[in-house]
Amino acid sequence: MPQSLTHAVGVIADLAGLQLSPEDHEFLRQPELSGLIFFARNYQSPQQLQELTAAIRELRPDLLLCADQEGGRVQRFRTGFTRLPPMLTLEQIYHRNPPEALELAQELGWLMAAEVRACGVHLSFAPVLDIERDVSQVIGDRAFGHDAATVTRLAGAFIAGMQQAGMAAVGKHFPGHGAVAADSHLALPVDERPWPQLQTDIAPFAALIQSGLLAGIMPAHVVYPAVDAQYTAGFSALWLQEILRRQLQFEGVIFSDDLSMAGAASAGDYAGRAQAAAAAGANALLVCNDRVAAQQVIDAARGLRAAGEFTALSLAYLQGPATTVVDAARQQQIRQRLAALWQE
């Protein structure tokens, strides 16, 4: 990690279409922008995505290019990519045959990362480290399991595969989103559980931080009154600075979850959300699906830097190797295993 992240702040925004517009060219030149996130609307084919990422690199080679390519229902790139199963599928195999499940988790991590990176996208916001408690519809089968030990082992194997393909790992949604029914995209969830139960959800994050496997963490837009009754984890210095940085000794990038989500609205307008997230300890301020809002967040980040409170955030060190070539034989072998899995 080439810089101290304690007071570094930048913005990750998105694009409207399949290629760069003249407006995008102007937008991307702003130094407060540290990265971009792609959605299904930005994808047509592997070749189109390669052309888009190449055009972005020509303009801003330092930007970190990201996506949500977890597998299952959260897979932005589909046509031309391997259909990945929901990660909860691995838990069923793990209970039957742990070595087989761990090996498959690693292969899936490699395949996801290799296919994404081959198109010029550096990072997928993965893995999900939430524990599935049969409560949260937004998490559900995105989780690796119903207990901390299973999640830790399977996600750790998945990360090992990602790293083989040159991709850094970002664990989400700290300290755990699996025990609330409300979807933070649409509402403000509150997790009323006492601290000892919250510690169970923190365990996968803590273990993978200690193992040095997480380059980034994304906190949840959830309120946990046992720790901080006023702010969601993503806006809470208690969660981000005291627990995540000091107690768990996490030194990587803290990515805010999308500041346009309903769960972030409690922090005010977009400038207020940006200022609150940065003050709490977030580094990369993620804002999606609203260019006007993204510009407001960029303006807020510019103001924070101008005031001398924060430094520029460079995420270029997370880009990984310059090129990734998919091992076609390994890819085909995994696809055959998945085909058999779909038939079970």
Image: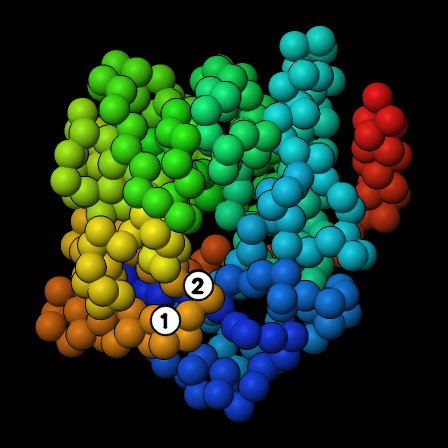
Q: Position of residue 247 (x, y in %)?
A: 22, 29
Numbered circles on residues, count: 2
Please identify the quadrant where the C terminus is shown. Answer: top right
Disc number for residue 288? 2
Q: Which residue is labeled 1 in the image?
A: 294
Mark 2 or mark 1: which comes first in sequence?
2
Instruction: Answer with left or right where residue 327 lies relative to residue 232.
Output: right
Instruction: Answer with left or right where residue 310 lies relative to residue 291.
Output: left
Q: Is residue 119 visible?
A: yes
- Is residue 40 shown above or below 222? below
Which quadrant of the figure has residue 331?
Answer: top right
Whether tag 2 and tag 1 are in contact, CB under 8 A, the answer is yes
Instruction: Specify the amino acid type for callout 2.
Output: Cys
Q: Which residue occupies 58% across, 61% down?
A: 39
Disc number for residue 133? none
- Label 2: how many residues lie within 10 Å, few (<14), some (14-19) or many (20+)? many
Q: Which residue occupies 70% across, 50% down?
A: 114
Mark 2 vs mark 1, CA separation in Å: 7 Å
Depth order, front residue of 149/99? 149
Depth order, front residue of 92/33? 92
